[in-house]
Amino acid sequence: MNDGVNDKGGMVDKDGVFDNDAVNDKAAVSDKAAVSDFVITRPRAFEFVRRWGVSIASFVGGLLTLFVFRRGLPRVGLIVGYLLLLWLLVAVLVQARDTLATSERRTHRFVLTATEYAVQTLYHGVLLFLLPAYWAATTLTSVNVVFFLAILGLALIATFDPWYQALVHPRPWAGYVFFLVSLFGALNLALPLVGVPPVAALAIAAWTAVVALTPAVCRARAWPWKRGLAVTALVGMLAMSAALAGRGAIPPAPLFLAESRLVWNVSTVDPPEPPSPIPAAALLQNGLIAYTAIYAPAGLKQPVDHVWRLEGQIVNVIRLTPVEGGRREGYRTYSRKTGFPADPRGRWTVDVTTATGQLIGRLRFRVVP
């Protein structure tokens, strides 16, 4: 007779004797397995908290800062302070990284780790400052959304330590991308806040961001400072030319549309809005007004255009009264169009742009028979 199990769950040998020790051994094995699973699970949980806990807390804190505590545009002094500290730390890190990394002293390695983390934290702070302003200035259906997405992507990488360590630490050039985008984006935003026209701010920001890499270039090439500065200044001129040529791809922060709508007239306090889509007969009879309120910082006077397009083709460009900054609700202006084509059917847009071609916002409407 083979061994079996009795109705009480015990082991029965071939002689029909109940084996209680086998039951105890089986229970002990089961208990050990449960304890083992618990012991394995706890370190995994602690490892997850250690690896991601600070990053998740930083992410939540950043969201609270953006949507709860922060209002309006950041102060120029705060931006400049962040940038100066960032440049100083990056310059020191470039000069001392090799020495600290190869040192066997624990203190040196701690200094290197702390400095790298401070630089990452500054990137995180600067990019969080930029996000609200560039979000407001971005037109999601235009090419300038790419620059906003770049800032957003870099901000997320800087927020989560494992991502930053995996992507940036092994690749020094990736750190320079963070540096260039952060410095360029911050200066492009800050300079108009003190009255510099957006197109001039764009050029100055591009040139300065490249020249600020002089310490890294001198270290990598073993060049004297005079030669490194001459090279970066020349490359900065090329970067400035590229920024001006591609200015349509950069949101014109801190300018943004505070309000925009299409109306039949502006002679009343609450002018009637046309139906959507707009009948062609009503459009030809009444014309149409594009009403916009554009926010600009105090002290800035910026010419703007309304560019009317039909199916992507320019029909009219109307130069408006220069926007004068300082009004919280935005500087109100409008353009009236009455000379529509005999067949105005199709998809229309009214692009609100700076005089130099940066897109501030866009209105859309469709005309049907």
Image (cartoon, grey):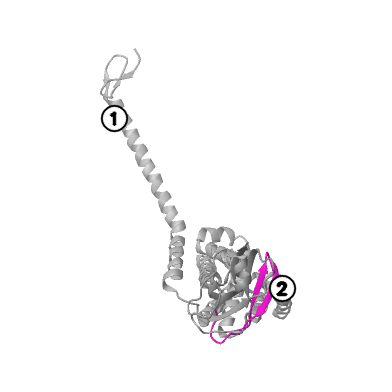
Q: Is residue 147 left or right of residue 2?
A: right
Q: CA distance from mark 1 to mark 2?
A: 81 Å
The residue identified by callout 2 is 245
Nearer to us in this view, 313 or 295: 313
Question: What secondary structure is found at the residue carrying circle 1?
Answer: helix
Q: Quadrant of residue 147?
A: bottom right
> What's the residue type where badge 1 is placed?
Asn
State the quadrant of the C terminus: bottom right
Q: Marks 1 and 2: which is nearer the front?
A: 2
Give the image location of residue 100, x and y in percent. 57, 67
The residue identified by callout 1 is 24
The tally of labels here is 2
Q: Main secondary structure of the magenta part?
A: strand
Q: Which residues are magenta?
A: 294-320
Look at the image and tell me whether residue 95 can be seen. Answer: no
Q: Which label number is shown at residue 230?
A: none
Q: Is residue 21 left or right of residue 320?
A: left
